[in-house]
Image: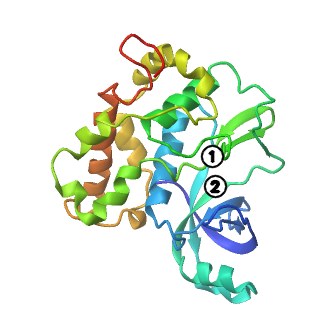
Amino acid sequence: MIASVAVTRYVTPLREGGSLPGIVEGDDLGTYVCKFRGAGQGVRVLVAEVVVGELARRIGLRTPQLVALELDPEIARYEADEEVQDLLNASTGLNLGVDFLPGAFGFDGELTAGEGVAERVLWLDAFTANVDRSWRNPNLLFWHGDLWVIDHGACLYFHHAWPGGALSREGGPGRFAAQPWSADDHVFAASVDALGPVDEELRAVLDHEVFADVLAQVPDAWLEPVPGAETPDALRAAYVDFLDARLGSRQWLPLDPAGVAR
């Protein structure tokens, strides 16, 4: 499992988007962007953050270290902002911590991503069905001259249907495997024609064992039971099945069978 760190101080909110992440300090002396389990999107976005962040690492992309942040309800007692206090009280237990990159700035297209990086980001987003890396919200940072990928909670959207019984119906992995993905609005859409060679390279890096190892990084506390998968290990196996099916297909790749962008 990803390392567990106790929150020692809530520093300040990051008022971006609707989830109200915050800067916190941990007992390992680290500083983290905390994504709260009590935010409106729920714990499944935390699962997606870990899974896709770890996949990004496996295919050679830079992404901040992730930890599980243990939040004591006492932290909320010293917060004057009522909205933040409510969020802290609703987030007792394990939350997600993303290593804070001081001095990082957002990608605006003026700096190059580095050789092959844009294609890898594009492939990762297609594979995980990420709908949130457009020019309006690139979710990319430059830090010490390198491009870093962040914010993957909008990936793996299929798991949001599982509480309603979607997992217990047959054919779920196959549906995800065949689900197309459009690069039209992607920040690196111009690189889509180069996806063919990158696709071959990255498929050789990922497999069933890699997916199982990635899911082992997710804390049990975020793997809430759903119909058809009532234990954390059963839920991990379901994620692996969906990722295996996706890797076994090319229908989601935004290239036609002749290798032409679509």
Sequence-first tag of 2 and 1: 2
The residue furthest right is: 103
SS of the residue under disc 1: loop
Where is residue 164 drawn, in percent x and y?
26, 65
From the image, tell me which residue sits under label 2: 98
| Residue shown at the point (68%, 89%) measured from the top left | 77
Callout 2 touching callout 1 (CB < 8 Å): yes
Q: Amino acid at mark 1?
A: Ile
Q: Nearer the viewer, residue 32 or 252?
A: 252
Q: Is residue 75 left or right of residue 129?
A: right
Q: Residue 5: which disc?
A: none
Mark 2: few, some, or many residues within 10 Å (few <14, many ≥20)?
many
Colouring convention used in this rendered image of the protein:
rainbow
Mark 1: few, some, or many residues within 10 Å (few <14, many ≥20)?
some
Where is residue 64 drawn, in percent x and y?
65, 46
From the image, tell me which residue sits under label 1: 150
The CA span between labels 2 and 1 is 9 Å
Can see residue 236? yes
Where is residue 21 drawn, in percent x and y?
65, 65
